[in-house]
């Protein structure tokens, strides 16, 4: 639930089997999913399977059933529709309200396609599949292309039919268009990226980057014991957090012990966010906490390093604060983010299966002892902060804009409504090929006919001479 009450907000808890799974899984189960990577990418399949299961749980919820049967009115529908929630577009149909699509990741090919944006396969890697930069080799571009094609085929021939099945099973309104048609009801897409600090790419007017909107302009105060701990860190403080999704508290003991041994060798203090009350052998320079306002910690002048899993929200916060990082990524999207850190010169990636006391110590001390990383982090921070409008204000402006202009259909390019073969100009290409083939065969026929006539005349002249 929200941390505080809001007068005009009604909160509805929607438990799903996926949430129950992730709250109880072991580290081995988690790592099995993490290690499921392929040459051809296509990492979206597992995520879409989980999201389809979650959507079905939502439709089964008593409160949702009552909502769909109610006479309530809504002016706008917020969905993360491009990440496997297409069936939830029934709310748009039910309440005759436009959709704003919130994209928790940065933009990628499928989001571009749904928004009518041009694909950038040659220079923008699939964020959910590969940790490439925007300067890809031939092999990497081949992998990127194959992953994109597989994703689109799966999306249209497997995922969307599954979402349509949910609509037909639980909504049962014959006037409801196919979910693929409901995607055209998306007014704008709010993308969790920062336009001035990502690999340069095109955006159509209905795609609005809002990276960093989750950060409040007023920092949440630190609990007093944590504030005192950080304020007294004369050599600086290292903040260690692997986010909320990674089950760090059930990590194998050898990983935890490796970090404990590293922290014993460091003069800095370490604030470690983890779901544990105590760790054997923990040195005095380490404080454990189960919760902390992360942006406030990172923005503290004594924070010298962020040990992170490489999540996108954490990335925005680290960029804003100007703090260099050592990243331990688990998912492809996090590896992509860490590659971006490295390309900016503000971080080092440390793979989980390579963590030892020495590798962790080397990564941490390299960042702390080399001023280049801190200088680059400060440069990045100045770029992120240099915006005409805060990301949160940008969100407010464009949400109100959609409301003011009845869904703002003028922002959507015509490509949203075109058939896929028209967008890719396949009808034009096939027509041109057909014309070229006709010209070729016609030319071939004429040349053959002329050659045949010439050869026949030559034989006739030769025969006449002999006579």
Image (spheres, grey):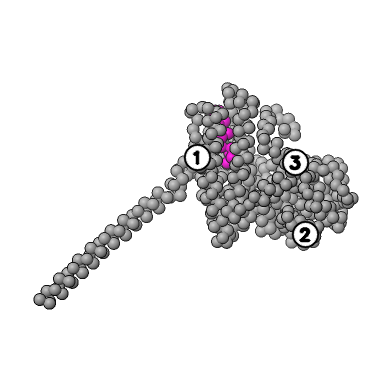
Q: Earlier in the sequence, mark 3 or mark 2?
A: 3
Label 1's element? helix
Give the x, y percent position of residue 318: 72, 50
Give the x, y percent position of residue 327: 73, 53
Please count the marks in the image.
3
| Residue furthest to the bottom | 466
Q: Name the residue carrying label 3.
A: 218
Label 2's element? helix
Q: Is residue 363 visible?
A: yes
Disc number placed over residue 359 in the picture, else none: 2
Q: Is residue 121 visible?
A: no
Q: Earlier in the sequence, mark 1 or mark 3?
A: 3
The answer to whether the residues at label 1 and label 3 have Cβ atoms under 8 Å apart is no
Give the x, y percent position of residue 393: 65, 41
Which residue is found at the position 74% from the left and 61% from the top? 372
Label 3's element? loop
Q: Quadrant of the C terminus?
A: bottom left
Q: Judge from the rendering whether residue 208 lies leftward or rightward of residue 268; answer left or right.
A: left
User: Which is the main secondary structure of the residues drawn in magenta?
Assistant: helix
Q: Magenta span covers which residues?
A: 81-95
Disc number placed over residue 204 in the picture, else none: none
Q: Which dot, 1 or 2, sits closer to the camera?
A: 2
- Residue nearest the viewer, comparing 376 with 132: 132
Q: Earlier in the sequence, mark 1 or mark 2?
A: 2
The answer to whether the residues at label 1 and label 2 have Cβ atoms under 8 Å apart is no
């Amino acid at each position: 639930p929200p941390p505080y009450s809001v007068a005009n907000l009604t909160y509805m808890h929607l438990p799903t089997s996926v949430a129950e799974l992730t709250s109880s899984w072991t580290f081995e189960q988690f790592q099995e999913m993490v290690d499921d990577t392929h040459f051809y990418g296509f990492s979206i399949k597992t995520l879409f399977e989980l999201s389809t299961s979650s959507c079905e749980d939502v439709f089964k919820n008593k409160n949702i059933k009552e909502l769909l049967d109610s006479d309530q009115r809504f002016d706008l529908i917020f969905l993360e529709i491009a990440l496997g929630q297409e069936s939830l577009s029934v709310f748009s149909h039910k309440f005759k309200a436009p959709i704003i699509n919130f994209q928790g990741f940065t933009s990628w090919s499928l989001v571009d396609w749904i928004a009518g944006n041009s694909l950038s396969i040659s220079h923008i890697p699939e964020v959910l599949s590969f940790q490439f930069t925007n300067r890809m080799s031939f092999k990497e571009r081949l992998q990127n292309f194959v992953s994109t094609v597989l994703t689109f085929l799966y999306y249209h021939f497997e995922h969307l039919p599954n979402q349509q099945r949910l609509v037909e099973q639980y909504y049962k309104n014959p006037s409801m268009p196919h979910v693929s048609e409901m995607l055209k009801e998306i007014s704008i897409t709010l993308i969790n990226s920062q336009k001035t600090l990502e690999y340069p790419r095109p955006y159509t007017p209905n795609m609005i980057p809002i990276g960093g909107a989750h950060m409040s302009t007023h920092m949440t105060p630190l609990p007093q014991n944590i504030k005192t701990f950080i304020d007294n860190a004369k050599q600086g403080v290292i903040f260690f957090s692997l986010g909320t999704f990674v089950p760090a508290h059930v990590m194998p003991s050898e990983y935890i012990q490796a970090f404990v041994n590293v922290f014993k060798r460091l003069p800095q203090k370490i604030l470690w966010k983890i779901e544990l009350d105590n760790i054997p052998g923990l040195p005095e320079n380490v404080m454990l906490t189960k919760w902390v306002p992360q942006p406030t910690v990172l923005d503290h002048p004594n924070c010298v390093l962020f040990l992170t899993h490489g999540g996108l929200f954490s990335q925005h916060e680290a960029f804003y604060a100007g703090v260099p990082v050592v990243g331990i990524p688990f998912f492809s999207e996090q590896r992509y983010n860490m590659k971006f850190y490295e390309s900016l010169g503000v971080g080092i990636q440390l793979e989980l299966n390579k963590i030892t006391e020495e590798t962790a110590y080397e990564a941490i001390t390299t960042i702390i002892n080399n001023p280049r990383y801190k200088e680059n982090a400060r440069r990045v921070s100045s770029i992120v902060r240099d915006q005409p409008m805060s990301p949160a204000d940008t969100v407010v402006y464009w949400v109100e804009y959609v409301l003011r202009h009845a869904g703002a259909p003028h922002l959507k390019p015509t490509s949203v409504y075109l058939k896929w073969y028209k967008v890719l100009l396949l009808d034009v290409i096939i027509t041109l090929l057909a014309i070229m083939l006709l010209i070729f065969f016609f030319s071939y026929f004429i040349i053959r006919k002329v050659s045949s006539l010439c050869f026949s005349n030559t034989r006739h002249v030769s025969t006449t001479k002999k006579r």
